[in-house]
Image (cartoon, rainbow, N blue to C red):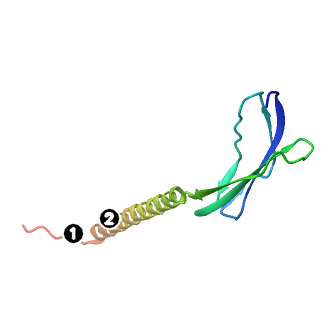
Amino acid sequence: LDQPITVLVTAQADNGRLDIDATPQVVEVPAAARASVNFAYTAVSNGMVRVTARITALDGTAIGASATATVNVQAGWETPIAAAAAGLLLVVIVLGIVRTVRRVRRERAATTADEAGAPEEPADD
C-alpha cells in the first residue's frame, strides 16, 4: 500500500499440540513496507500442526484471505527429563553417602563398646 495501515493479526493452531496466544496482535505497517508479528506459544507435544493466520481491519473486516502453514512442533521434553534424571541421581548419591556414614558410625560405636567392656588381661610376672 502507498499509505500506512494498522491491522489486527490472529493465529490459530488446528490441534492441541501447539497452544498459541489467542490475543489479536495490533500491527502498524508503514507505507510500502512489510511487518512481522510474533505470537506467544507453547509446544505441548510433538507432531505436525497447521497454523492459520488472519488479518483484519480494526473494525473486524477481513483483509485478504487467511494464510495457512504446516509446522513441525518439537515439544522439547528432553530438558525436563534430563533434569529429573539428574535430580534422581543426586538423591541416590546422597542416600548412599548417608547410609555409609551411619554404618561407619555404628561400627565404630560397636568397636568402642567392645574395647570398653573387655576385661583387662593380667600381667605375667
Q: Is residue 84 left or right of residue 55?
A: left
Nearest to N terminus: mark 2 or mark 1: 2
Tell me where residue 32 appears, x and y as whole percent. 74, 28
**Mark 1 nearby-residue class (10 Å; few <14, some 14–19, many ≥20):** few
Tell me where residue 123 appears, x and y as whole percent. 12, 67
Which quarter of the rendering shows the N terminus? top right
- The image quadrant that residue 73 belongs to is bottom right
Residue 44 visible? The answer is no
Which quarter of the rendering shows the C terminus? bottom left
Q: Residue at x 15, y 70 (%)?
A: 122
Q: Residue at x 24, y 72 (%)?
A: 119
Amino acid type, residue under disc 1 in the picture: Glu
Q: Which mark is residue 108?
A: 2
The residue closer to the viewer here, 26 or 121, is: 26
Q: Residue at x 31, y 65 (%)?
A: 112
Q: Which mark is residue 120?
A: 1
Q: CA distance from mark 2 to mark 1?
A: 20 Å
Amino acid type, residue under disc 2 in the picture: Arg
The residue closer to the viewer here, 50 or 114, is: 50
Q: Residue at x 89, y 41 (%)?
A: 58
Under circle 2, the secondary element is helix
Q: Is residue 120 left or right of residue 74?
A: left
Identity of the residue furthest to the right in this view: 59
Q: Which mark is residue 23?
A: none
* Above or below, 65 relative to 58: below
Tell me where residue 9 appears, x and y as whole percent. 79, 45
